[in-house]
Each structure stands twice: as C-alpha cells, then as structure tokens.
C-alpha cells in the first residue's frame, strides 16, 4: 500500500507518517527532509531551493518531482511507501500519477489558529536542539537546556512566513483534497499526538 499524508503546515504530518511507517515497517520519504539534506550538503539543488523555502514558497514542481523520483528509486518499496508532504500541487500529483500508484491519502485537518500556535511557538538553538514555548519549553526561557546558548526563531517559523505558507497551501495544495477524493481519509489533527495516531489506525482498519 502506498500512502500520502496531506495537511496544513504544522498539522503533524511528519510525526504521524513516522508512526505509520514504523507500524507497517515501510519506508517514508519527506520532501522537507530531502531538501534539508541537499541544503546542508550545499548541493546544486540545495543552493537553488534554500531561498525559496525560507520565504515559505513552493519549489517548482518539476525540480521537486525529479528529486523525489530519484530518492524513491533508491528504496525498497515492494511492501509500500509513505509520502510525507508530497505532492503539494495538482501538477506534482499528475507527475506522480505516472510514476506511482497511490492507495490511501490521509488528510490531517487543523485550524489556522492551531497552525500559528504550533509553528510560531517553535524555538531553535544553533546546537540543533529544538523547543516549543508551550509544548516543550526550555527550563530557562529563551535559553537552550543543552548548551546554554540563546534560542532563536527560524525564518520559516515567523508569523509573516507562516501566513504566507498557509496562503500557498490554500491556493496550491488544498485542491489535492478533491484530486484524491476517491482515496482520501480525513483525520482530526487537533487532539494530542497519541489520539491522532489511534484515530488513523482505526480508520485504516476500517478501510483495509
């Protein structure tokens, strides 16, 4: 079975995709992780997409598809695959359709207020540790527990960028809900993580 996780930024797609991948013992591929890998390694693709992502915009469809295709081709997907955060536009979905059959699309629903709270509350340290002012605060406000350095707000966690990401989602990604209407299962993403994971498991059992 091949799965896609859809949802607004901050909806918990990545967390739930990892839980499902572990449960079914199938590989997971995330566009975000792929882009971050290329940016960290300063590849040609990484340098190309760095500025685009920091503004909250979408990387051009063809570039993203070729990256994902190459990544998938390196994996054993004989028992299935989970796509986290891909496709993000109708064009990407059409390109993917020619390459991979999608069985189930899990759409995690979340309010915009919750998106702003979840992403806007993130704090990061240069040492790599991450926190959240509400859900995972440091022991001392604004200071990293691990190294004692000052925390900062990443560009993609600033309110202006979040609102831009939401607008991009509405315009380019939300139409996928209708595109995949035959395969879609809607999930309430507002409850705590374990409850969302349980709801996904129950709905998959019903639909399998």
Image (cartoon, grey):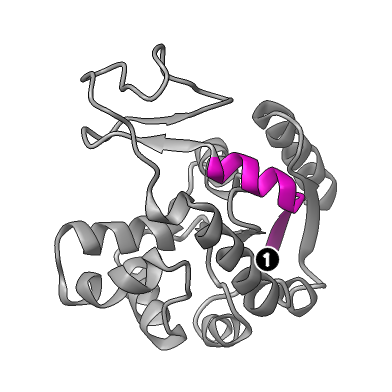
114 left or right of 98 in image: right
Badge 1: residue crowd in 10 Å (few <14, some 14–19, many ≥20): some
Which residue is painted at 74% across and 29% down in the image?
A: 195
Is residue 20 something one can see in this rendering?
no
Which residue is painted at 54% across and 82% down in the image?
A: 92
Residue 105 in picture, x, y percent from top left: 69, 62
21 left or right of 105 in image: left
Which residue is painted at 74% across and 74% down in the image?
A: 180
- In-front residue for pair 114/67: 114
Q: Quadrant of the N terminus?
A: bottom right
63 left or right of 42 in image: right
Residue 26 in picture, x, y percent from top left: 48, 48
- Magenta residues span 104-120
Residue pointed to by mark 1: 103
Residue 29 in picture, x, y percent from top left: 43, 57
157 left or right of 12 in image: left
Element under disc 1: loop
Q: Quadrant of residue 89?
A: bottom right
Q: Image height check: is 36 above or below 187? A: below
Q: Quadrant of residue 31?
A: bottom left
- In-front residue for pair 164/64: 164
Residue 62 in picture, x, y percent from top left: 41, 87
């Amino acid at each position: 079975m091949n799965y896609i996780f859809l949802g607004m930024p901050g909806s918990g797609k990545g967390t739930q995709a990892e839980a499902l991948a572990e449960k079914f013992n199938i590989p997971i591929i995330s566009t975000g992780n792929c882009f971050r890998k290329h940016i960290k390694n300063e590849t040609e693709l990484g340098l190309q997409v760095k500025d685009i992502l920091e503004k909250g915009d979408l990387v051009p469809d063809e570039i993203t598809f070729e990256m994902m295709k190459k990544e998938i081709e390196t994996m054993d997907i004989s028992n299935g695959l989970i796509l986290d955060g891909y496709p993000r536009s109708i064009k990407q979905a059409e390109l993917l359709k020619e390459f991979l059959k999608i069985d189930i699309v899990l759409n995690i629903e979340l309010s915009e207020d919750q998106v702003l709270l979840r992403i806007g509350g993130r704090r990061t340290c240069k040492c790599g540790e991450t926190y959240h002012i509400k859900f995972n605060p440091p022991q001392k406000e604004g200071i990293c527990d691990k190294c004692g350095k000052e925390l900062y707000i990443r560009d993609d966690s600033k309110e202006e960028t979040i609102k831009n990401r939401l607008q991009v989602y509405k315009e380019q990604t939300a139409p996928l809900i209708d595109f995949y209407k035959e395969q879609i299962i809607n999930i309430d993403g507002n409850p705590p993580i374990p409850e969302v994971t349980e709801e996904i498991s129950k709905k998959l059992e019903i639909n399998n």
